[in-house]
């Protein structure tokens, strides 16, 4: 009997995880013996399969929430999004007046609120009630607040306050009116050359500052970059960040091991550096340079750097394939800029630019003389958060 390769490939991940029935295993193994392309894909996926869902199993998350948290692009648009702290339920955090809910993600819900003491509008991020029962996620949430609070830079979303009140873990952040780069890409597929460089240059400047204070973001992607109404790019969501000098290896009061375990994957597969796909614990600033290069590639081409039908297939491409520009579709991207992006996305961290400063200098050569952006309207946008 002949089977469709595309159909059977969807079972490879389950096969690698030992979740198929004996009859399904028999059918798939027979096909792998007869199909060189599927056999090669199986060989490549096997190299990364040991790191993936197993590393997240200790979080005890529902499978759909885990899929959304790790790899949002694979979630079914028709499926209801996992709810964060029952968004329609009344929320009360002492010292804050809730105005409206502005976004719900798989890990948290964010509200527009007023910090009463300063009469300041903030974005109030509330950890999902199910995750709040897990000490590891609580500690990550609080660590995000601590790490972000150390960063004071015009291209980084500021965090003002954080803690626990009324059984809720919360974080008060700078309220930004704008759109994420992910939203802009969904609206217009790709960004004009000048605008993409302008945004990437600002993020690179934020990374220069992050390097100075010893923070590795570990999840730079279009959904975590906001363009505000003044055309200023702001880097958000430090939930994956590593504070090299202070927070890495810090223990939760209820834990006996570091928050980031050896061999753990953290980040978003499409923009993740190869070394991060293998072990997020030991990554350095070069991983952020890679992710910025992948983000810039997406902004300029309208395409994801690496694609695949499953998380494992994408990670396999991240580890083994090189990013490619199309000679016709990408003819408007200067060859020197293409070379810079390839260098930023080099598999070997040592072959990437030595620092974010070097990236800033390189991007500055392509920047608009006035640093202006002419392609986005100036009207304010509500920010759907978080991602």
Image (cartoon, helix red, strand yellow):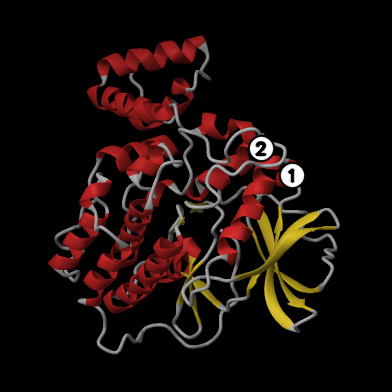
237 or 10, which lies in front?
Answer: 237
Residue at the outermost front position: 245
Residue at the (39%, 40%) spot, across then down = 277
22 or 7, which lies in front?
Answer: 22
Return the x and y of residue 120 as percentages of the image width and height. 71, 82
Disc on the earlier residue, 1 or 2 = 2
Q: Quadrant of the C terminus?
A: bottom right
- Residue 101 lies in quadrant: bottom right
Q: Report whether residue 107 is seen.
A: no
Whole-Å distance between the Cαs marked 1 and 2? 10 Å
Residue 284: which disc?
none
Residue at the (24%, 48%) spot, across then down = 350
19 or 77, which lies in front?
Answer: 19
From the viewer's perspective, is residue 355 above or below residue 229? above
Return the x and y of residue 96 as percentages of the image width and height. 80, 73
- For label 2, count other residues whose C-alpha is less than 10 Å away and answer few (under 14), some (14-19) or many (20+): few
Q: Quick check: marks 1 and 2 in contact, CB under 8 Å? A: yes
User: On the rendered structure, is 231 left or right of 373?
Assistant: right
Q: Nearer the viewer, mark 1 or mark 2?
A: 1
Return the x and y of residue 61 as percentages of the image width and height. 66, 38
Q: Secondary structure at mark 1?
A: loop
The residue that mark 1 highlights is 130
The residue that mark 2 highlights is 62
- For label 1, count other residues whose C-alpha is less than 10 Å away and answer few (under 14), some (14-19) or many (20+): some
User: On the rendered structure, is 129 left or right of 15?
Assistant: right
């Amino acid at each position: 009997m002949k089977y469709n390769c595309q159909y059977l490939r969807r079972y490879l991940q389950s096969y690698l995880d030992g979740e198929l029935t004996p009859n399904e295993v028999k059918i798939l193994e027979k096909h792998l013996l007869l199909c060189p392309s599927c056999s090669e894909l199986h060989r490549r996926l096997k190299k990364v399969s040991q790191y993936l869902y197993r590393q997240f199993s200790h979080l005890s998350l529902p499978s759909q929430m885990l899929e959304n948290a790790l790899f949002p692009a694979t979630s079914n648009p028709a499926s209801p999004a996992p709810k964060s702290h029952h968004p329609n339920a009344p929320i009360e955090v002492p010292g804050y007046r809730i105005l409206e809910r502005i976004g719900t993600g798989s890990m948290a819900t964010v509200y527009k609120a007023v910090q009463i003491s300063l009469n300041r509008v903030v974005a109030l991020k509330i950890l999902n009630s199910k995750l709040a029962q897990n000490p590891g996620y609580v500690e990550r949430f609080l660590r995000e607040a601590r790490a972000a609070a150390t960063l004071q830079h015009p291209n980084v979303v500021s965090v003002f306050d954080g803690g626990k009140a009324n059984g809720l873990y919360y974080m008060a952040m700078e309220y930004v009116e704008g759109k994420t780069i992910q939203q802009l890409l969904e609206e217009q597929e790709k960004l004009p050359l000048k605008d993409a460089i302008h945004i990437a240059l600002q993020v690179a400047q934020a990374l220069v500052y992050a390097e100075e204070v010893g923070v590795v973001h570990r999840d730079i992607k279009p959904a975590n970059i906001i363009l505000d109404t003044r055309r200023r790019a702001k880097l958000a969501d430090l939930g994956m960040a590593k504070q090299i000098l202070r927070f890495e290896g810090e223990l939760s009061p209820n834990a006996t091991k570091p928050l980031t375990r050896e061999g753990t994957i953290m980040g978003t597969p499409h923009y993740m550096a190869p070394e991060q796909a293998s072990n997020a614990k030991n990554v350095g600033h070069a991983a952020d340079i890679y992710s910025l290069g992948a983000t810039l590639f997406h902004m300029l081409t309208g395409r994801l750097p690496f694609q695949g039908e499953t998380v494992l297939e994408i990670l396999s491409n991240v580890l083994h394939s090189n990013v490619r520009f199309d000679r016709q579709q990408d003819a408007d991207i200067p060859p020197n800029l293409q070379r810079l992006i390839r260098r930023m996305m080099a598999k070997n961290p040592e072959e990437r630019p030595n620092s974010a400063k070097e990236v800033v200098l390189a991007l500055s050569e392509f920047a608009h003389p006035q640093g202006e952006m002419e392609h986005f309207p100036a009207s304010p946008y509500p920010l759907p958060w978080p991602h």
